[in-house]
Image (cartoon, grey):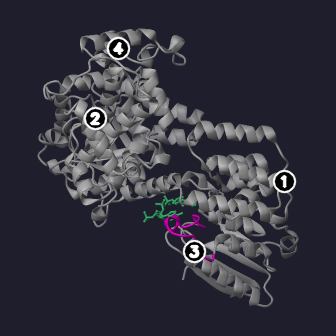
Amino acid sequence: MPVKTRREGTTAHVTLDVPPVNAIGRETRQGLIDALDWVEAEPGLERVILAGAGRAFAAGADAREFDGPALAPHLPEVVARIEACHVPWIAAVHGAALGGGCELALACRYRIATPDASIGLPEVTLGVVPGAGGTQRLPRLVGLKPALEMIATGKPVSGETALALRLVDELAEEPVFAAEEVNHELLSTMVAVGDLPGPAGDDEALAAAREAARRRMRGQIAPLRAIDLIEMSITEPLAEAQAVEREIFLKLRTGAQAKALRHIFFAERAARAPDWLRDTVPAEISRAVVVGGGTMGAGIAYAFLNAGIFVDLIETDAEGVARAQGNVDKIIAASLKRGLIDEAAAAKRRAALSVTQDYAIAREADMAIEAAFESMAVKQEVFGRLEAEMRPDTLLATNTSYLDVNEIAAVLGDPSRLVGLHFFAPAHIMKLLEIVRGDATSDAALATGFALARRLRKLPVLAGVCDGFIGNRILARYREAADTVMLEGSTPWEIDAAMVAFGYAMGPYEAQDLSGLDIAFANRRRQDATRDPNRRYIPIADRMVNEGRLGKKVGVGWYRYPGGGGKVMDPLIEDLVREEARFAKVDRRAFEPGEIQERLVLAMINEATRILEEGIAQTAADIDVVTVAGYGFPRWRGGLMHYADTLGPKAVLKRVEAFAQEDPVAWKPSGLLRRLVDAGKTFADP
Ligand code: COA
């Protein structure tokens, strides 16, 4: 039974019970309607306490239902009946009260929450607007500005903040007990939120919210629609505005953006725990060794410390030890400054860290991760030394971005212990974690990797061994396609602008300036020996590096950064590109933004289908998670392969074949792409 009811004296308890997080589907709505019928028929009730079983109050509408037609009874009906019920309802909130869960709470006469509850209307993050009165009741209760902030960004607030906003009336560690204690007189004087007057108008706040939505959630429809609806709450009666809200909600729900955002929401969750690993028990990790305390190693060390894991950071010499300590200290200080941790938490992290040159420290560790220099010899030496010290049952991990995990594992007596854990910089912030399975990697090592990712609050994606794994391999094709367009007639700024218009936060050249051109350069040198000689090689980025244009860190890359500040276009680059085009005997021509986007995105899609075909990625959805969480592909397009499905494999193949006329090597369609088209399947089909 999704909704449980019981009576204790004059109190009725209505409890949502849909594990794991009480998502509200049709049966739950029906259960609430039945509960309302029961409450209305019960004589002598003083209060109804609405709560959630398990770890949440309610995670909102069951998003899995959104692909089909809206099923009665609908949530607005439930909300209206709770609000109009002759017995006052009290929401006893713990955990998440999101979306429809928050709207149920808003329908109640009184709200009590735990201090760490998470309350909000995150619908825009799923491409819709609240659909059961949220855009009308929240501004009535908390005022226009906080409502705009919460609904248009979708960011929930804690119980404590909710109290400060008067979104809840009371905080309690045990909200159900507290609800039983609420004074009856007080309860009977509480006004229904829907009966409160609309909020005061504030044109400035509305304009600022629209500006912020256009900037921060560029390309997305729902935030702007939500702001329009909130604006209606100032002047329009609840019933009329709610009818408009419902109409917009239903329309957005079946739209492309909502589908894409739902897809990525579920793809992220599916990636976290592959089914076939469910029965493999992961090892407990309480102490970890991190080898290498550069930017990456320090970030990884901090991510571990954040998760309550003791860290021993190993460096090669005294200077390295001091630098590594300094790097972690800097991250701790920055987290303190940003208010992410307090002084006590900072002290705890400092106390849980040791930095040393002595590998003997690894004897105590449950795992080790290497984040040393990207050199096979260096990595093999590190693992030889780790294996000599560590217990045989412990996990060994490499953070290599490109090197062959099998070759690294070859030095180990037991290569099944080694897994790739490819973090993204800054490692304590970026969510993506590629978990790389070598030929010998055991399921136990993989399961520990996935469990660790969950503990570090990362988004893990399983990848096979190849040059660049999933993400960097796709990135290489993206950059190659961009360089080709540049050589053939475009400029870095035109290409960047086209990709920003597509939905990226920044284009490929600005991104390179930010990460530094030297890393990719070193990587290209490593690939020189094995590069297909028939593949066109565009040396412009090499020239940049040879001329010292390494990116923002030196003040000049594809752009110039005078005084270390914002980017400025550099006409010198255009001369350089024209010169290279002359050497390559290319007749340059103009590219429209649409064609730039098409070439760059299709190049990635074609490579991604090869990655799938080779089993480097398990599913198209995994590639979506990688491209969104690690490489800035617009979330509202659902990830690279979801986007490919919106184009359709047939259309993708047709265009790839057309481009292959120009360059049959770079644009060779993958076998999988052809097979999908022949079978009439999509990328999402298993
Ligand atoms: N609809 C359908 N399923 C949902 C859901 C929803 N609104 N919210 C969560 N779930 C599912 C998840 O897919 C996951 O399923 P799985 O175990 O099969 O993978 C399960 O519930 C647990 O969710 P998860 O996100 O893994 O748990 P968590 O404790 O990390 O986070 C929430 C819980 C509620 C904070 C998070 O799930 C969330 O933000 N949900 C969406 C809330 C929302 O946007 N609601 C508005 C809907 S319009």
Label annotation for residue 71 = 3
Q: Earlier in the sequence, mark 2 or mark 3?
A: 3
Q: Are marks 2 and 3 in contact (CB under 8 Å)?
A: no
The amino acid type found where label 2 is placed reads Phe
Q: Is residue 283 above or below residue 627?
A: below
Question: Would you call the spot at circle 4 few (<14 residues within 10 Å), some (14-19), or many (20 or more)?
Answer: many
Disc 2 to disc 3, C-alpha distance: 46 Å
The amino acid type found where label 4 is placed reads Val
Report the residue at 82% width, 67% height from top: 192
Where residue 566 appears, as percent x and y from the top left, is 54, 19
Under circle 3, the secondary element is loop
Q: Is residue 130 above or below residue 26?
A: above
State the residue in front, 115 or 667: 667
- Find disc 1 in the rendering and name its residue: 235
Question: Would you call the spot at circle 2 few (<14 residues within 10 Å), some (14-19), or many (20 or more)?
Answer: some
User: Magenta residues?
Assistant: 57-73
Tag in front: 4 or 2: 2
Q: Is residue 209 shown left or right of residue 196?
A: left
| Residue 106 image-quadrant placement | bottom right
Tag in front: 2 or 3: 2
- Find disc 2 in the rendering and name its residue: 659
The amino acid type found where label 1 is placed reads Thr
